[in-house]
Amino acid sequence: MQHGWNYLHGFPPNDGWCSPGYPRFIWSDVLRRRGWSMGRRDHYLIGAPWIYLLDKEPDLGRLPEDQREGTIWYPFHGWEKSSVQGDHARLAAEIREVETGPVTVCLYWLEYGDAAIRQAYKAAGFRVISHGHKGTRWDGKGRDFLRGQLKELRRHRRVASNRLGSALFYGASVGCDIAVYGDPMQYEDERPEYGGTARRMRLWPDLHGVQVDRDLAREVARSELGFEYQAGPEELRRLFGWRKARCA
């Protein structure tokens, strides 16, 4: 299953992580078409897990509009096999110049564990949090990751980042204004297949800047998250090979 928003074909560039013949469950039709153009098959459109959370818990963390305040800011992060190169102190200073209300900086669990990175944002007067460990298929960690993220997004008026990504589309889908600005930072071994910042700017120029049209952001978010492809319970059982639970 597609892990997060992705502007290639929904998955990593190489196929070594996935056994041939396994179905690939993706969020949006543009990813399916791009995957087909690159010789990939067995794509099934089901939309993002996020849209199922909104359907199941429509009022989770919901606040009256006049009680939402400030910005939640997601710095681009690394992962377990590759760190990100960038100056967090300089980014914190730019955020302080742009944002006018209270700021929450949400760090990935790896960066949150780095005291120097946390301090760069705390020194700017920001609240610093993490949504926690993403977990794996083998442990129980991360099961409430998206629920916690939804509650945080719904308490803020804006969501911002230095790269277009999942959190911005999630926020736009629940009424946040979005912004993309600041040093986009880089992976140590960033894959050229993605096309980098130039490609993101070319495909979504109107979603970059300190102010982005709210209606446009919401429209793009609904498309990229695949709202129109949400599957029903019976369809998901068939696609995933799940059997109905039997009563004793």
Image: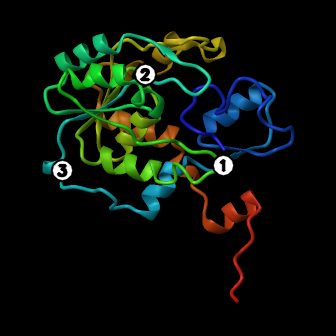
Label 1, on which residue?
Answer: 137
* Residue type pointed to by label 2: Arg
**Secondary structure beneath label 3:** helix
Left or right: residue 36 versus residue 11 is right
- The image quadrant that residue 181 belongs to is top left
Drawn side of residue 139 relative to residue 19, left or right: left
Q: What residue type is labelled 1?
A: Arg
- Whether 41 is drawn above or below 154: the answer is above
Quadrant in which residue 12 is drawn: top right
Q: Can you tell which mark lies on residue 65?
A: 3
For the residues carrying marks 3 and 2, which lies nearer the camera in this image? 2
Element at badge 2? loop
Residue located 45% across and 15% down the image: 201
- Say which residue appears at 39% left-offset and 34% top-offset: 168
Q: Residue furthest bottom?
A: 248
Instruction: Give the residue displayed 43% in from the left and 56% down from the top.
Output: 54
Q: Where is residue 25 in the image (x, y as percent from the top left)?
A: 68, 45
Mark 2 to mark 1 CA distance (whole Å): 27 Å
* Quarter of the image where the N terminus is located: top right
Looking at marks 2 and 1 on the same chain, the residue that comes earlier in the sequence is marked by 1
Looking at the image, tell me whether mark 1 or mark 3 is earlier in sequence order. 3
For disc 3, the neighbor class at 10 Å (few under 14, some 14 to 19, many from 20) is few
Label 3 vs 2, first from the N-terminus: 3
Which numbered dot is residue 163?
Answer: 2
**Residue 16 or residue 57, whichever sits in front:** 16
Could you tell me residue 203's position as x and y percent?
A: 50, 19
